[in-house]
């Protein structure tokens, strides 16, 4: 779909906002990325949940639903969350985590409604996630450690989990109000 879903996502005061009063629809980039650096700022309302996914495949049958569309089953997610008020309190599912796989370290979040800065770097299978100027996640995708973590996660039954090494970047609409701004992506050349 090439049309922007302006009833579902809207822009206000320079921020891209997920409308919680509509059908959920994730946003994906038109372009595909392999090695890249993504910078963005995010904020959430009370008890809000969202995420940023990478190397997504465009499957329009999965682009709407209840915020738990099958897209999240196949790819790594950098979790965006109100840690204090959301019902799921596991550290591996908290803000800044690699969802259900790696809990963040050195995490310092801004208060609800204030913008956090984030940076995602994917370079030849190595991934870093930075949150408010501090590296909170650092891993290599095909490492024995990641294979072990995947085998212990909810993704263990999915042999296709992150099997693609290139794809779209996706911003998740999970049914709550979440804000993104200053989104920038650049390809890393080798």
Image (spheres, grey):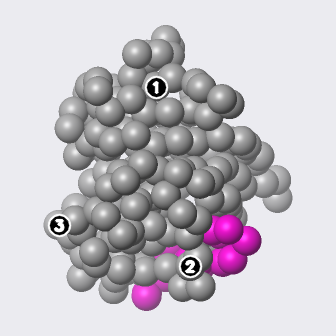
Q: Quadrant where the C terminus lies?
A: bottom right
| Residue positioned 46% across, 25% down in the render | 9
SS at circle 1: strand
User: In this rendering, is residue 165 above or below 174?
Assistant: below
Depth check: give the residue in front, 106 or 155. Answer: 106
SS at circle 3: loop
Q: Which mark is residue 9?
A: 1
* Residue 115 in the figure: left or right of residue 56: right
| Residue positioned 66% across, 29% down in the render | 13
Magenta segment: 130-145
Say few, some or many: other residues with alpha carbon within 10 Å of mark 1 (under 14 / 14 to 19 / 20 or more): many
Which residue lies under the disc numbered 2? 107
Confirm whether residue 18 shows in the render: yes
Q: Which mark is residue 157?
A: 3
Say few, some or many: other residues with alpha carbon within 10 Å of mark 3 (under 14 / 14 to 19 / 20 or more): few
Question: How far, Cα to Cα, is label 1 from label 2?
Answer: 28 Å
User: In this rendering, is residue 126 above or below 73?
Assistant: below
User: In this rendering, is residue 111 above or below 184?
Assistant: below
Depth check: give the residue in front, 169 or 178. Answer: 178
Q: Nearer the viewer, mark 1 or mark 3?
A: 1
Q: Quadrant of residue 144?
A: bottom left
* Residue 25 in the figure: left or right of residue 17: left
| Residue positioned 49% across, 11% down in the render | 3
Q: Pick whichever of labels 1 and 2 is earlier in the sequence.
A: 1
Q: Pick whichever of labels 3 and 2 is earlier in the sequence.
A: 2
1 and 3 marks in contact (CB < 8 Å): no
Is-magenta flag for residue 140? yes
Say few, some or many: other residues with alpha carbon within 10 Å of mark 2 (under 14 / 14 to 19 / 20 or more): some
């Amino acid at each position: 779909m090439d049309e922007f879903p302006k009833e579902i996502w809207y822009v206000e005061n320079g921020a891209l906002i997920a409308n919680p009063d509509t059908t959920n629809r994730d946003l994906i980039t038109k372009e595909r990325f392999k090695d890249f650096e993504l910078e963005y700022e995010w904020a959430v309302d009370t008890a809000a949940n969202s995420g940023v996914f990478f190397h997504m495949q465009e499957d329009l049958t999965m682009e709407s639903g209840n915020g738990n569309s099958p897209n999240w089953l196949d790819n790594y997610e950098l979790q965006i969350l109100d840690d204090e008020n959301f019902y799921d309190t596991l550290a591996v599912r908290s803000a800044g985590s690699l969802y259900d796989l790696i809990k963040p370290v050195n995490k310092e979040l801004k208060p609800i409604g204030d913008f956090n800065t984030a940076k995602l770097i994917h370079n030849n299978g190595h991934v870093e996630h930075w949150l408010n100027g501090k590296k909170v996640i650092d891993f290599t995708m095909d490492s024995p450690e990641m294979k072990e973590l995947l085998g212990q996660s909810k993704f263990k039954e999915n042999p296709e989990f992150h099997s693609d090494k290139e794809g779209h970047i996706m911003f998740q609409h999970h049914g709550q109000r979440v804000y993104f701004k200053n989104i920038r992506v650049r390809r890393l050349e080798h």
